[in-house]
Image (cartoon, helix red, strand yellow):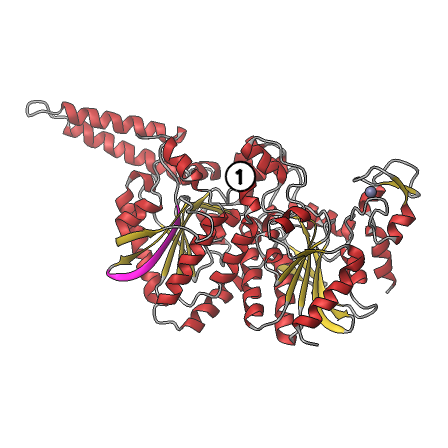
Amino acid sequence: MNHYLDFEKPIAELETKIGELREYSTDSVDFTGDIKKLEKKAQKLKTEIYTKLTRWQRTQLARHANRPHTLDYIEHIFTEFFEVHGDRNYRDDPALICGFAKLDGKPCCVIGHQKGRNTKEKVHRNFGMANPEGYRKALRVMQMADQFGLPIFTFVDTPGAFPGIGAEERGQAEAIARNLREMAMLKVPVIVTVTGEGGSGGALAIAVGNRVMMMQYSVYAVISPEGCAAILWNDGAKGPQAAEALKLTAQDVEKLGTVIDDVIPEPLGGAHQDHKLAAASLKEYLLKHLSELEDLSADELIEQRYQRFRAMAEIEEQQ
Amino acid sequence: MVWFRKKTALTASAETKKVKIPEGVWSKCKNCQEIIYAKEIERNLNVCPKCDYHFRIGARERIELILDAGTFVEMDANMRSVDFLDFKDSKKYKERIKAALKKAGDGDAVICGTGNLEELPVVVAVFDFAFMGGSMGSVVGEKITRAIEKGLESHAPVLIFSSSGGARMQESIHSLMQMAKTSAALAKLKAAGIPFISVLTDPTTGGVTASFAMLGDLNIAEPRALIGFAGPRVIEQTIRQTLPDGFQRSEFLLEHGMVDMIVPRSEMKQRLSQVLRIFTKS
Ligand SMILES: [Zn+2]
């Protein structure tokens, strides 16, 4: 099923028309000329709309129901993927996918939040909001990758860690905190990509990497715009204003200089327009960064990762 | 050290002052509702003498309670927050910083330094909730990281007293990154075998809990402190139920295995000293 955001509708209408014309084309009636014209128009309209998106619209794109999720990227980028389950303590968390695979023939570890597409899947995946056991599973698997000397690729796509009673009882804060500390000590390359929503500590808990990248229409912030609005504006509906204030788009974050290494281009109109093309773009960047990190020693990797985060501060020191 | 004492007086029992009953003389405890002679609460380390409720206290006040008199040497006292995102909600972040400096003093939301705890050299970082709800932005993250690095360099135990609503939203992604930065510094401290004690005081939530505050070799809580990842309001909105009594309080965390012990304010210094002497074999 196709979902359209409000600002996507004019494009969708044009594309429907183009599809209809194609269908009516026969040997005797030729609409090729009209189709070409409309396609040109659609392309122009897309460029126009997508270069002028507000931060809120970009947030909606990052959450788009048709956007590729971790399992989609795995399918298009890796081979021989197998998933592993459970934190060996409480249960398996379907909101976080962990496993091993090959990237261009090289064995590696893959970790990522997973959202669902239909209601049943969404509920099963808890809307991509992991519980403590999800973060503990991720740590278990990352440390296993460390043990076997395998590079780790993580894919961030979550509104945030799940805020529930059970999550608090089982130590949501401790699970996230431990991941932050332990990821800092991993002796293998860690390459992080924010593919959709990078929401708060729940995102960061799998995002302490030697490289951190964002897909062109992804967002990354300390809190969701709605959560921020609820606290600072006392009104959760003020999400659009909060999105502006939080400066959460890939382009905003890139401007800060120290937080991300690359913004990965997406197909015109967003990754959901063409999963394969989006995945190919992402794969190129994963390979590039892996080749840069592959020859570093364990100590060098730990130190590079440390310095990367150590440099993040916007402060003023008076004499 | 006149300025020091003046600040203490200013931050003292901000909560007890809110009460409308005879200015300054009598205070109403927000836990047991008893009307108590304000001086008596103050003399009792800002703990209610009737019900043992621990009022929030300022950073400098806590430093006085924990460190040996006259041994505290502040670090990074001149570090200031910057409004690098031009963040504005109902008020500009720039103005919020200015107002907080005026209200809570010049340390931002955390005050760090070195000192002695029963003659044992330590590094301390103490939150001040009065400064923008103890929120962690770049300054807090940087100060904490430098404090941990100081412990690493001088081989001194590190103590962090948290009291924070979490990450400072006005610094968006940079506040989030402070969680990773401080936790990575703690990884180094741990590898070096230097003790880190996290003391959780009311309230400790959000990004502070989900980073260094939960990473103590020991996590020690003051009685009845609110400690959690998500705030109670957010959880209630998510699950659409009211929360059980005592949820996310120190005693709840102890029961669920998230803190090692609950120590009343009056015994904190002594207990910290005992713990550190065992851990450092001194
Ligand atoms: Zn009382």
Residue A216 appears in the figure: yes
Quarter of the figure that contains the N terminus of chain B: bottom right
Residue A2 at x, y percent in the picture: 31, 30
Question: Where is residue B229 shown, x and y percent of the image?
Answer: 59, 47
Q: Say which of A200 and B169 sits in front.
A: A200
Identify the residue at the far left of this view: A27
Check disc 1 and give the amino acid type: Pro
**Which chain does the residue under circle 1 lie in?**
A
Circle 1 residues within 10 Å: few <14, some 14–19, many ≥20:
many
* Position of residue B66 measured from the top left corner of the image (x, y, whole percent): 78, 63
Ligand number 1: quarter of image: top right
Highlighted magenta segment, given as a residue range: A105-113
Taking the magenta stretch, the answer to whether it contains residue B174 is: no
How many numbered marks appear? 1
Q: Is residue A37 left or right of residue B271?
A: left
Name the residue located 68 percent from the left edge and 64 percent from the top edge. Answer: B159
Magenta stretch: dominant SS? Answer: strand
Residue A147's image quarter?
bottom left
Q: Does the magenta stretch include residue A112?
A: yes
The quadrant the C terminus of chain B occupies is bottom right
Q: Is residue B181 above or below residue B280?
A: above
Above or below — where is B191 with respect to B247? below
Of residues B167 and B67, which is closer to you in this image?
B67
Residue B82's spot in the image, x, y percent?
63, 54
Q: Is residue A114 left or right of residue B227?
A: left
Asked if residue B74 can be seen in this view, the reply is no
Q: Quadrant of residue B185?
A: bottom right
Disc 1 target residue: A225
Taking the image as shown, residue B270 lies to the left or right of residue A231, namely right
